[in-house]
Amino acid sequence: MTAIPPPHLSPSSMGTFRQCPLKFKYNKIDKIPDPSGKEALMGNFVHDVLEELYKVEPTDRTQDRAKTLAREMWGSGNWEGRVKPLVPDAGEYRMFRWKAWWCIENLWKIEDPEEIEPDGIEYELNGEVSGITIKGFIDRFTLDEDGGVVISDYKTGKVPRAEYVDQRFLQLRIYGTLIDILGIGQTTNLELLYLKDGIKHEVPFGPADAAETTQYIQDVKRDLDHACETDDFPAQKSVLCGWCSYKGICPEWT
């Protein structure tokens, strides 16, 4: 039976399709839930706190204010109820909270929050690249006086090895391409803020990058449509299978 492709793509869903077409099918076409792990929950909590931090006046963006926000949001967002089922051990639960705070605290190693003037926080992008609908959320972007856009993305995982750093910018390149098309501004720089280690990686972005990214989007959409027409979504075994929620039903593992 011919599968129906989803009405839109996101950078993460395109990455999933390239990583493992069968995982994409399970999640985006068969709609089998993919529950968040504890690492994703930590990332979500840290993102939520930093989103609120950058909404307050610049002079109030202190570590003390961040601690207050984190404590208040932990309670109001029922984070204990969300985290404890995945981290039932009391010591591990305390360590989870400490690690989340260390990620927030390390923001000050990367930048001075008082000097950042965001023009978009958790900004939803919804538009088309070569007729392909793309949706996603940008953690943060800023505009300079000339209309140049800097896109920033928070990461709570490990800093990748040097040879893999460039691959981590693909999501932001897709967002930069879409920002240019939507007329929000002209993307000039991309930033990955690795909060766990307090390290920032940044690269420039220009027309050649947008053209290369557009080709990537077109290629993924072409291959996805073909997979839907033929109902051929092969599983691709890799080291990432160890973290896959669908391993229990994957034909490569059952």
Image (spheres, rainbow, N blue to C red):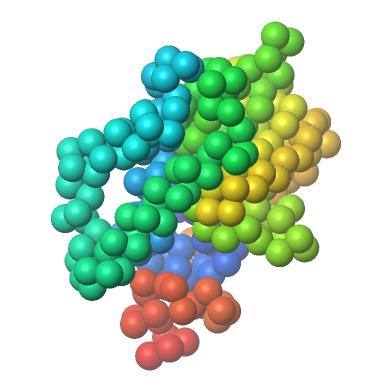
Rendered-image quadrant of the N terminus = bottom left
- Vertical position of residue 93 compared to residue 172: above or below: below
Query: How many marks do you count on the picture?
Result: 0
Q: Quadrant of residue 86?
A: bottom left
Question: Is residue 222 visible to us here?
Answer: no
Question: Percent x, y for residue 66?
Answer: 38, 34
- Name of the residue lying farthest toward the bottom: 254
Q: Decide which of 123, 219 is in the foreground and name it.
A: 123
Residue in view at x 59 percent, y 48 percent:
198
Rendered-image quadrant of the C terminus = bottom left
Question: Is residue 44 visible to us here?
Answer: yes
Question: Percent x, y for residue 61?
Answer: 45, 24
Question: Percent x, y for residue 100?
Answer: 39, 52
- Name of the residue lying farthest toward the right: 208
Question: Percent x, y for residue 13?
Answer: 49, 53
Q: Decide which of 71, 164 is in the foreground and name it.
A: 71
